[in-house]
Amino acid sequence: MGRPPSPAQRAVQITFVLKGHLKNVQVAYIRVAALLAKVRDEKLYRALGHATMDDYAAARLGLQHAQLYRYLAVYDWIREFHRPWLARRPKGFIPELTDAQALMWIEHRLADPHLSDGLRKELERLRAKALAGRLTLREFQEARRQGSAGTPPLRAVLRTLRAARRRLAGIPGRRSQRPTASRGLPGCRGSARRGGRPRACNRCTRKQGA
């Protein structure tokens, strides 16, 4: 009968198994997201009698809209910016779902051509840490605070509207409605009427035309 493994040998063996399980966890959400996107893109939910993707996800998978959108948004981002992660056996570090969402936010902010040099440099530093798995929640929250503080109000409003349209466009059976000048900007107090129809105030019209 052979000698039992030493504590050091057992620790090495268990650590090896743990790494494998953790890798599977990291890849699992990507596989879930990819399959959900397939059902969405090919409208396979209709074959099961569901009118929308939301109905299918809630009835068949127990996923509410917020959860469903989170998976689909992460998948669309990975497909565009990190396609190697979709490989059957991806190599290298892959962030967990929460960390992936933080990285997605950072990369979307970096796409803004109006970022200050200082903020861009800081976001690049945080992006490198996120890709290495070293970004902390506190660092990310501070980055979001700085990013929000450095965004002009009108640009923030427009970005929110664009994000809302993208979310609505991804829901089958729903149509997004573009804001028009007749509605004015959110929070407008100077709307007027002409010929019985609402009209945007001059302040909103000037801002929307800027």
Image (cartoon, rainbow, N blue to C red):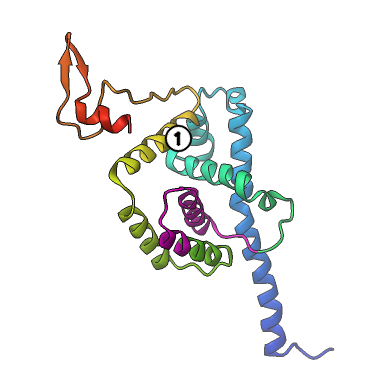
According to the picture, the residue beneath numbered tag 1 turns out to be 167
Q: Quick one: label 1, few (<14), some, or many (20+) residues within 10 Å?
A: some
Q: Identify the residue shown where x is 48% and y is 29%.
A: 169
Residue 202 to residue 15: above or below: above
> Is residue 154 found left or right of 47 in the rendered image?
left
- Dominant secondary-structure state across the stretch colored magenta: helix
Identify the residue at image location x=67%, y=76%.
14
Q: Can you tell which quarter of the image residue 34 is in?
A: top right
Task: Name the residue rendered at 44%, 30% in the picture.
Answer: 168
**Picture layout, residue 90 above or below residue 191:** below
Disc 1 marks which amino acid?
Arg
In the rendered view of the protein, which quadrant contains the N terminus? Answer: bottom right
Chain part drawn in magenta: 93-122
Residue at the image point whose x is 79% and y is 91% from the top: 3
Residue 91 in which image quadrant: bottom right
Q: Nearer the viewer, residue 4 or 190?
A: 190
Which residue extends farthest top? 195
Q: Nearer the viewer, residue 168 or 179?
A: 179
User: Which x, y percent locates residue 129?
Assistant: 53, 67
Residue 44 place in picture, x, y as percent: 62, 27
Query: Going by the image, does 54 lie left or right of 147?
Result: right
State left or right for residue 122 relative to residue 150: right
> Which part of the image, by quadrant, shows the C terminus?
top left
Q: Is residue 99 magenta?
A: yes
Q: Residue 98 in the image: x percent, y percent?
A: 49, 57
Horizontal side, residue 192 vs residue 45: left or right: left
Give the number of callouts.
1
Task: Name the foreground residue: 144 vs 67.
Answer: 144
